[in-house]
Image (cartoon, rainbow, N blue to C red):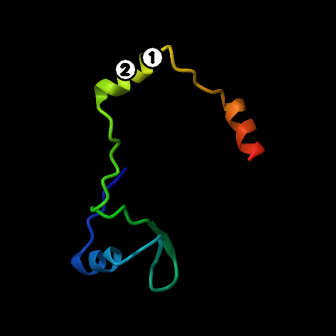
Amino acid sequence: MSILIVDEALGAKLGKADGPVEICTRDGRRLGFFTPGPPAKYDLEPKISEEEMRHREQDTTSKGHTTAEVLTRLRSL
């Protein structure tokens, strides 16, 4: 992915966005869309260590569910 550095004025405008924003030129030509990232106050990283993830991957005692089983269950709700 490329990175575009914006000037302070545009950065301030985009910083106020609370949802997706369409970005256009003055003559109405669409340049693209901007979707703001989650606020820094939210810690969205998983609360699990690498060691625990490896342990869960290797655990053969826990039964998983197939996609078909999950879809069947969801349709029954």
Residue at screen point 37% across, 50% down: 1
Amino acid at pointer 1: Asp
- Tell me the quarter of the picture where residue 48 sits: top left
Q: Regarding mark 1 in the picture, which secondary structure is present there?
A: loop
The residue indicated by pointer 1 is 59
Q: Regarding mark 2 in the picture, which secondary structure is present there?
A: helix
Q: Position of residue 71 (x, y in %)?
A: 71, 38
**Residue 15 horizontal side relative to residue 77, left or right:** left
**Residue 37 horizontal side relative to residue 27, left or right:** left
**Residue 5 horizontal side relative to residue 28, left or right:** left
**Residue 41 horizontal side relative to residue 73, left or right:** left
Q: Nearer the viewer, residue 22 or 45?
A: 45
Badge 2 vs badge 1, beta-carbon distance below 8 Å: yes
Marks 2/1: CA–CA distance: 6 Å
- Tell me the quarter of the picture where residue 40 sits: bottom left
Q: Position of residue 62 (x, y in %)?
A: 52, 20
Residue at screen point 71% across, 43% down: 74
- Tell me the quarter of the picture where residue 5 sits: bottom left
Residue at screen point 51% across, 73% down: 30
Q: Position of residue 57 (x, y in %)?
A: 43, 21
Q: Position of residue 47 (x, y in %)?
A: 32, 41
Amino acid at pointer 2: His
- Work out which residue is located at the far left of the displayed protein and give it: 8
Disc sitting over residue 55 in the figure: 2
| Neighbour tally class for label 1: few under 14, some 14-19, many 20 plus, Cα within 10 Å | few
In the rendered view, would you say 37 is above or below 7? above
